Image: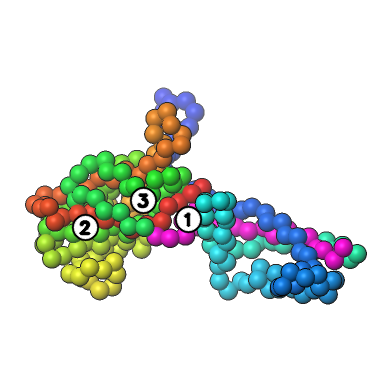
């Protein structure tokens, strides 16, 4: 309770919970060549599908496709029904419940976007159309640049080099920021591999909503009056930049 305030305090920025849904399978008697193999082939097909869905030592990659729309998610099988078998028709039907521990559906391929190292409200065009936050983006800032801060416009969550100490990169250096691993490094080659550089995690400053437990999540926002337009806007501020300085984002779009 809060004195002088009715109801509950609003809490924003909460993470989404894992989601579950059902998959219904109909198994027929078709052979790999498309012929009718009868009841025995249906049993063979049922066993093959059961072996695929019964894997527990790793996540299963689930792919959804509807025309040009292709999305993937890593899932686990949490429950499965007993098959309903129609002996005369050589068919079986059963249902499995899958859970998406990582919550979001993703694009299959990773894209790379390039913008300015010192500009506000830049649309990350490769992430347009997302409906969920991108929590695992890789950010790369090419120098020269000092006092670097990268900010997600929708949430105002930001990450950057501390304003004291080693807070600049030269023209031959790149600052890599891994939002998923919450790590940073400075490299001297054209790479996205943090392991090849000098670790800078200890001099990274993170602030804004949720900064105690996460680094910048790139969050789509709906354009005013247009529910079909969803853009990820990013700002990058730095001093001492030149025409060679730039910001890059490597990520996959994310969907609820």
- Where is residue 94 shown, x and y percent of the image? 76, 60
Q: Residue at x 71, y 73 (%)?
A: 32
How many numbered marks have been drawn onto this rendered protein structure?
Answer: 3
Q: Earlier in the sequence, mark 2 or mark 3?
A: 3
User: What's the distance in space between the residues labelled 2 and 1, CA to CA?
Assistant: 24 Å
Residue, disc 1: 106
Residue 178 painted magenta: no
Residue, disc 2: 141
Is disc 2 placed on a helix, strand or loop? strand
Q: Is residue 128 above or below residue 108?
A: above
Which one is closest to the eye, mark 2 or mark 3? Answer: 3
Q: Earlier in the sequence, mark 3 or mark 1?
A: 1
User: What's the distance in space between the residues labelled 2 and 3, CA to CA?
Assistant: 17 Å
Which residue is outermost to the right?
A: 88
> Which residue is at the front of the view, 183 or 68?
68
Is disc 1 placed on a helix, strand or loop? strand
Q: How is the image coloured?
A: rainbow
Magenta residue span: 89-110
> Which residue is at the front of the view, 251 or 109?
109
- Where is residue 17 shown, x and y percent of the image? 53, 50
Judged left or right of residue 237, residue 129 is right
Q: Which residue is drawn at 39% across and 60% down?
A: 110
Is disc 3 placed on a helix, strand or loop? helix
User: What's the distance in space between the residues labelled 3 and 1, CA to CA?
Assistant: 13 Å
């Amino acid at each position: 309770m809060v004195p002088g305030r009715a109801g509950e305090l609003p809490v924003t920025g909460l993470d989404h919970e894992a989601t579950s849904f059902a998959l219904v399978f109909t198994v027929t008697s078709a052979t790999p060549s498309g012929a009718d193999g009868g009841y025995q082939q249906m049993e063979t097909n049922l066993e093959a599908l059961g072996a695929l869905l019964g894997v527990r030592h790793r996540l299963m990659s689930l792919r959804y496709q509807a025309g040009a729309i292709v999305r993937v998610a890593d899932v686990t099988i949490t429950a499965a029904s007993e098959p309903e078998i129609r002996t005369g028709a050589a068919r079986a039907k059963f249902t499995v419940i899958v859970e998406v521990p990582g919550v979001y559906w993703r694009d299959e391929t990773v894209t790379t976007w390039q913008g300015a190292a010192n500009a506000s409200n830049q649309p990350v065009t490769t992430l347009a159309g997302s409906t969920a936050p991108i929590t695992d983006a890789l950010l790369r800032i090419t120098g020269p640049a000092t006092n670097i801060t990268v900010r997600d416009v929708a949430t105002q969550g930001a990450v950057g080099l501390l304003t004291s100490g080693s807070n600049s990169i030269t023209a031959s250096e790149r600052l890599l920021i891994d939002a998923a691993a919450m790590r940073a490094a400075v490299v001297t080659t054209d790479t996205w591999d943090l392991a090849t550089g000098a670790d800078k995690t200890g001099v990274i400053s993170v602030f804004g909503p949720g900064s105690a437990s996460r680094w910048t999540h790139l969050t789509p926002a709906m354009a005013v009056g247009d529910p079909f337009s969803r853009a990820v806007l990013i700002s990058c501020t730095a001093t001492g930049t030149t025409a060679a300085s730039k910001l890059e984002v490597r990520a996959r779009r994310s969907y609820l």
